Image (tube, helix red, strand yellow):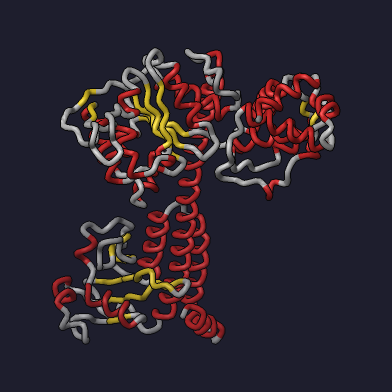
Amino acid sequence: MIPERFAEFVARLRRGSGERDRARLAAVLELNRALAKAPDRRTLLELLLDEAVRLFAAERGFVLLAPDAGTERLRVAAARTLDRESVQHAEKKVSSTVVDRCLRDGRAVLSEDAQAGDLAASRSVADLKLRSVLAVPLRAAELTLGCLYLDHRFHAGVFGVDDLPWLEAFADQAAIALHLHALLEQVRAHSRRVESDNLRLAAEVAAQTERVTRLQAELTRGGLRHAYDEILGDSPAVLRLLHLLDRVVDGEYPVLLVGESGTGKELVARAVWRHGRRAAGPWVAVNVAAIQPELLESELFGHVRGAFTGADRARDGLVRRAEGGGLFLDEVTEMPLELQAKLLRFLEERAVRPVGGDLVVPVDLRVVAATNRDPRRAVQDGKLREDLYWRLAVVTVPLPPLRDRREDLPLLTERFLAEAAAARGAPARRATPALFDALARRSWPGNVRELRNAVYRLDALAQDAELGPELLEPEALVASANLPTLDLAQLEQLALREALRVADGNKAEAARLLGISRRSLYDRMGRSD
């Protein structure tokens, strides 16, 4: 180990040394200063070998370092002559026997006359005609980096036992310098990579920022070809949706809408039809999940008379009813797999075969499908045929959940308050800033449908012109997945019942609370009977 070997060397110096030892010590110290200033490893190795050859009167010096990746043998990293010149074809000038023994045993190999000692039998020693040889391992931080190798081909006895401690100390200092230089180079390489990565990331961020800035500047309703008044919102998420719709509404290919329950998939699907080329044709919407599986095929593709029990007359089916217009298939991932195959055939052939019939009927329409599942996950789970997925998802349009478009909450709330007021036949109530704040803090798992029901309920329960958050149900009590949608007639009856409850059945007081006449109250109550 380095500390032990170096301690022995220092003890030897303390016991006394001659002029040659003092000169060598001064040279080693001077070499350390020179190695510390070496700008690169090649310069470091040449300084090291030139001084080793000079101090130990060698003919040549070699530094062999650990092999590169994919190689097994050590490589000659530097080789110098007594004249301070590089050794040509250095790999062929080193005895493999000496190097292997040095590294295998982990200690110095010294031969005062290699032609007469135990190295004489070595083929490499004989071929190279070596006389004096001295090799010591280069070790630092418990690592063997390689070896320092000196030789002389023309004189025996150039190196002696007294040279060993000096060369070992010399090698130890050289190994430390090499190891530190390697670590420094790693740090420099890492710094260069970090700098390069930073420059690349900075360029990417700048490019992304420019693209986002440009897109945001472009993403306004003013840049749309169609108004899309039925889709409320000016948030970035809604504007991205509208600009995507603007690029696909004029096409004929299928569109797949993907979004959580309550995000308005049917509303968006209707917009694709209404603003597209087939707006003059019919619009047919089908909730696949709401039809019994055994009836779904005949509902979609029709049937001939007598096709099954109860088929007392022929039916065209919903697909044929959408001829020339648009067909919306909601929750398409809930369709049985065997029927998905028939839907795929219809999409590819543009023709339907009624149940029990032989006649194939061509149908020309545009299909918009929707799902609240991740369609790729549905394919993996066996809920959706992969070939049907690729046929439907020519364009996939993601619908943003309400939590990603909170900027639209005030606009949506005011629209729903206006709808509620129209059902009551009275002026719309006003939402307070406190109510908007409370709405913005909610997670809205039921999305816009949940917001609509919450606003309708607030309007039905409130007695004042302004609405605060006091009447909001705790979020934990709100059903999150499949909230029923109230139409205006249902909302009107809810408002009537709530007003009569608050007025303890007093119809005059209930009419006053609703802001309508008693006659109007009776008329509306009569419609509920």
Residue found 24% across the figure and 29% down from its top: 352
**Which one is nearer the viewer's eye here, 352 or 514?**
514
Give coordinates of residue 243: x percent, y percent. 48, 22
Would you place residue 509 above or below residue 422 in this image? below
Quarter holding residue 413? top right
Give coordinates of residue 444: x percent, y percent. 63, 41
**Which one is nearer the viewer's eye here, 96 or 113?**
96
Would you place residue 195 above or below residue 142 in this image? above
Residue found 21% across the figure and 25% down from its top: 361
Give coordinates of residue 454: x percent, y percent. 68, 36
In this view of the protein, can residue 404 be seen by the observer?
no
In this view of the protein, can residue 103 be seen by the observer?
yes
Give coordinates of residue 270: x percent, y percent. 46, 23
**Which one is nearer the viewer's eye here, 259 or 56?**
259
Judge left or right: residue 401 versus residue 76. right
Judge left or right: residue 4 versus residue 157. right
Residue found 40% across the figure and 25% down from its top: 284
Quarter holding residue 246? top left
Would you place residue 387 above or below residue 156 in this image? above
Numbered label tally: 0
Would you place residue 484 above or below residue 432 in this image? below
